């Protein structure tokens, strides 16, 4: 599974709300004897769609979906437009059911851009759009994994449908966030070419590890002996009832009969679970924990603690961010202290104060470098990226190009399991230090296909929003610097 695209306002992280429709979208790449293909998964929240009476005198939602796949040279290679009907219901005052869509699109190996437009037919709201880039690179000479499809539930297939794989109907779970009420983590993947490379049985090891330090969770580790074949399907599962809140990786490893590692696949997900075993342990610690003795700073002053908690947002998980975004302003001093202690105890219940001290040094640094009259350093785009991903390996700074706004290109050799990732920040105000994140090729970050034209808008008219690259501009180096490896 390539990634989760969560659309409530607009996944490309602009601040404008295009619609109230709530949709989750993911995709995964697969191979077959007929050639590679991509599967797309879309889950529409019934409560967010408009249900109207149909010819059966029942209420039904209707979503118009347009998918365009473009090659690396911007040519359209696949197009699909269809209307997705929700389930029929008798009464709109009752719960409106969610509905799922799965599509398969055949594509050759190569780099692609996908553009998805989603419109609620029964709503006057503007359609929403997803834009993303991906690569398909299957070959016959090495063991490879498909993408990873997360599964909500499965059952034996009575008839064949788009949800059927290897005799099972697999209902996709279209999110990489697992709330407390989910106790099962189920996934599907395929292994290719083991018959050509090995022609013997092999081991598939699969486990969960902590995202921050790659520590393997042995209680969530297993293996299975599999027979070689052109395509080896695998459906795996873990009981995550006691998995604590946090960021995790699902890791798949193919090993030969000598236990030598041949191929690895990783998938990132988040868990929210305040009832997990280690949460109970943390709660016991919190009873007699002295915040002033264990943490640097003014822990009894509400304004100071407010800023200490606000600066945690770049490294907080989704559940922790909700408190910062929605509850922090009205929280009491005691609630703030409890949140702050719990935040660090989850990450290190032996020396949480030392972890906070190290992080605070980074916060103080970005405050010195990136603070402006409007924003603290940690709430600026550059400060947030620095705290979330660490110091960049390289920074290119340009302030005086003829047509470009002042900009910086940050390069990271490795972030998580992705290599050579870039962030482009620019200052459309020209004066001051209010740099905004314009574009990044990292999963989950802002993607702006026409970033180069926007960057050079200072002296260039943006007459065509579909154009991605700017005209040749004397003195401009952004494109050259961005493409550097």
Image (cartoon, rainbow, N blue to C red):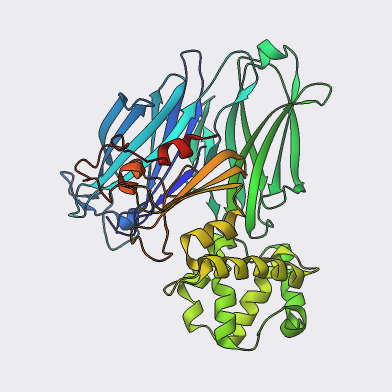
Q: Residue at x 66, y 70 (%)?
A: 360
Point 67% across, 68% down: residue? 361
Residue 279 visible in this rendered orientation of the protein = no
352 above or below 400? Answer: below
Percent coordinates x, y for residue 24 in the rendering: 41, 48
Residue placed most toward the observer, 33 or 413: 413
Image quadrant of residue 418?
A: top right
Q: How many numbered dots are placed on residues in this image?
A: 0
Residue 27 left/right relative to 389: left
How far across and how far down the image is residue 120, in percent? 24, 48
- Vertical relation: 280 (above or below) 428: below
Q: Residue furthest right?
A: 258
Residue 326 placement, left or right of 332:
left
Q: Quadrant of the C terminus?
A: top right
Q: Residue at (50%, 59%) from the top-left corner?
A: 382
Residue 473 in which image quadrant: top left
Q: Please provide percent x and percent y for residue 2.
A: 51, 38
Q: 102 or 132, which lies in front? A: 132
Q: Residue furthest left?
A: 55
Q: Residue at x 68, y 62 (%)?
A: 276
Could one spot residue 448 in this view of the protein?
Answer: yes
Answer with the quarter of the image where residue 80 lies. top left
Give x and y (percent) for residue 25. Answer: 41, 43
Comparing 181 with 140, the one in front is: 140
Q: Is residue 161 left or right of residue 297?
A: left
């Amino acid at each position: 599974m390539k990634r989760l695209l969560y659309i409530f306002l607009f996944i490309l992280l602009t601040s404008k709300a295009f619609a109230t429709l709530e949709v989750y979208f993911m995709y995964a790449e697969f191979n077959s004897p007929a050639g590679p293909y991509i599967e797309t998964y879309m889950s529409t929240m019934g409560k967010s769609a408009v249900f109207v009476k149909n010819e059966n005198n029942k209420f039904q939602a209707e979503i118009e979906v347009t998918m365009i796949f473009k090659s690396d040279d911007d040519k359209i290679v696949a197009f699909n437009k269809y209307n997705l009907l929700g389930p029929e219901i008798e009464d709109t005052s009752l719960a409106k059911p969610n509905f799922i869509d799965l599509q398969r699109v055949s594509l050759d190996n190569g780099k692609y851009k996908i553009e998805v437009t989603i419109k609620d037919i029964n709503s006057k709201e503007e359609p929403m759009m997803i834009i993303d880039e991906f690569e398909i690179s299957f070959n016959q000479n090495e063991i490879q994994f498909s993408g990873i499809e997360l599964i909500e539930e499965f059952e034996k297939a009575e008839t064949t449908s788009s949800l059927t794989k290897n005799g099972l109907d697999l209902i996709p779970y279209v999110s990489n966030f697992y709330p407390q009420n989910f106790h099962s983590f189920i996934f599907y993947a395929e292994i290719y070419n083991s018959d050509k490379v090995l022609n013997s049985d092999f081991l598939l090891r699969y486990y969960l590890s902590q995202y921050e330090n790659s520590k393997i969770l042995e209680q969530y580790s297993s293996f299975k002996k599999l027979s070689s074949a052109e395509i080896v399907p695998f459906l795996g599962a873990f009981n995550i009832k006691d998995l604590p809140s946090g960021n995790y990786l699902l890791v798949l490893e193919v090993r030969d009969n000598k236990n030598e590692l041949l191929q690895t696949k990783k998938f990132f997900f988040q868990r929210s679970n305040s009832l997990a075993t280690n949460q109970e342990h943390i709660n016991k610690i919190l009873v007699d924990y002295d915040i002033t003795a264990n943490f640097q700073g003014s822990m009894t002053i509400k304004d100071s603690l407010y800023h200490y908690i606000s600066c945690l947002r770049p490294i907080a998980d989704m559940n922790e961010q909700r408190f910062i975004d929605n509850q922090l302003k009205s929280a009491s001093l005691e609630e703030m202290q409890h949140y702050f202690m719990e935040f660090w105890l989850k990450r290190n219940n032996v020396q949480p104060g030392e972890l906070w001290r190290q992080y605070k040094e980074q916060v103080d640094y970005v405050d010195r470098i990136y603070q402006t009259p409007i924003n603290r350093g940690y709430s600026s785009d550059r400060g947030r990226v620095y705290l979330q991903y660490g110091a960049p390996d390289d920074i290119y700074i340009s302030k005086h190009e003829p047509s470009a706004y002042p900009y910086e290109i940050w390069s990271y050799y490795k972030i998580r399991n992705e290599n050579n990732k870039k962030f482009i920040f620019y200052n459309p105000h020209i004066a001051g230090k209010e740099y905004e994140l314009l574009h990044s090729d990292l999963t989950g970050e802002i993607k702006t296909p026409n970033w180069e034209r926007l960057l050079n808008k200072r002296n260039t008219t943006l007459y065509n929003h579909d154009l991605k690259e700017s005209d040749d501009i004397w003195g401009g180096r952004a494109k050259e610097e961005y493409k550097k490896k």
